[in-house]
Image (spheres, helix red, strand yellow):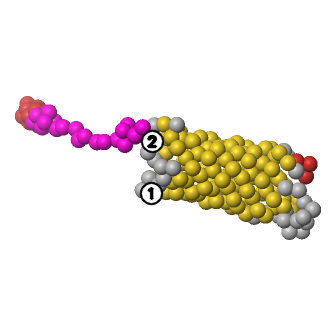
């Protein structure tokens, strides 16, 4: 029986090798290899509303460099200037220069995206009223982009800038909700 078992095993292996020889790999297309990776530049205007006192309105402008890793994923670097206006006539506005890096992922129809950015914010005006002149900056956003236009809704949190609490004491962390409208182009 030992010889018969070895013959059966050898026969099964021979048939399996014959079928394995005829198997062909299925061709797949990979969009990432066919997509031109490259750089984009965007110039935008921002308007928003601060969710913490003493600030209310925010206005700014930015420049964003973007490197497209694939058709759906990009890396970003953004800087610019944002001014947080105080709600009281006797207060001082807070001017900020953000420097942030981010990751953008297109999630629907290659036009709707989600993005997360992190970096530092440097206070340029009203620095005497803040304990820190530099703050951690975190900013998630959702948006819609075409070949030239980019519209997004974002929340930006400045972790180390001072705010007024409800009882009048100073607290940490200033947040703002904003809209960004930008014009972008390939480099």
Q: Position of residue 20 (x, y in %)?
A: 16, 36
Q: Residue under circle 2?
A: 70
In the image, residue 59 above or below residue 11: below
* Label 2 Cα crowd, 10 Å radius (few <14 / some 14-19 / many 20+): some
Residue 28 seen from this side? yes
Which corner quadrant holds the N terminus?
top left
In the image, residue 67 above or below residue 155: above
Q: Residue at x 37, y 43 (%)?
A: 31
The local secondary structure at tag 2 comes to: loop
The local secondary structure at tag 1 comes to: strand
Q: Position of residue 39 (x, y in %)?
A: 52, 37
Read off the magenta span.
15-36
Tell how many labels: 2
Dot label at residue 35: none
Quadrant for residue 89, please give it: bottom right
Query: Upstream in the sequence, badge 1 or badge 2?
Result: 2
- Residue in the foreground of this view, choosing between 79 and 75: 79
Q: Is residue 151 in the magenta section?
A: no
* Label 1 Cα crowd, 10 Å radius (few <14 / some 14-19 / many 20+): few
141 vs 169, left or right, is left
Q: Is residue 29 in the magenta section?
A: yes
Quadrant for residue 25, please give it: top left
In the image, residue 179 above or below residue 75: below
Dot label at residue 108: 1
- Residue in the foreground of this view, choosing between 11 and 27: 27
Residue 155 seen from this side? no
Q: Residue at x 45, y 42 (%)?
A: 70
131 vs 98, left or right, is right
Q: Residue at x 74, y 51 (%)?
A: 82
Q: Residue at x 18, y 37 (%)?
A: 24
Estimate the spatial distance between the alpha carbons at disc 1 and disc 2, rounded to whole Å: 15 Å
């Amino acid at each position: 029986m030992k010889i018969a078992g070895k013959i059966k095993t050898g026969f099964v292996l021979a048939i399996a090798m014959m079928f394995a020889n005829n198997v062909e790999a299925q061709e797949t297309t990979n969009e990432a290899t066919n997509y031109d990776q490259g750089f984009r530049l965007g110039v935008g205007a921002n308007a928003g509303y601060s969710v913490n006192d003493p600030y209310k309105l925010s206005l700014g402008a930015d420049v964003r460099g973007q490197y497209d890793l694939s058709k759906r994923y990009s890396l970003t670097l953004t800087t610019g200037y944002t001014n947080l206006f105080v709600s009281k006539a006797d207060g001082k506005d807070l001017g900020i220069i953000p420097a942030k890096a981010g990751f953008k992922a297109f999630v629907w129809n290659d036009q709707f995206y989600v993005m997360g950015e992190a970096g530092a914010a440097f206070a340029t005006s009203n620095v005497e009223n803040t304990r820190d002149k530099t703050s951690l900056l975190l900013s998630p956003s959702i948006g819609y982009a075409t070949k030239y236009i980019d519209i997004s809704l974002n929340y930006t949190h400045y972790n180390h800038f001072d705010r007024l609490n409800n009882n009048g004491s100073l607290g940490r962390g200033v947040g703002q909700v904003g809209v960004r409208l930008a014009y972008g182009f390939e480099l």
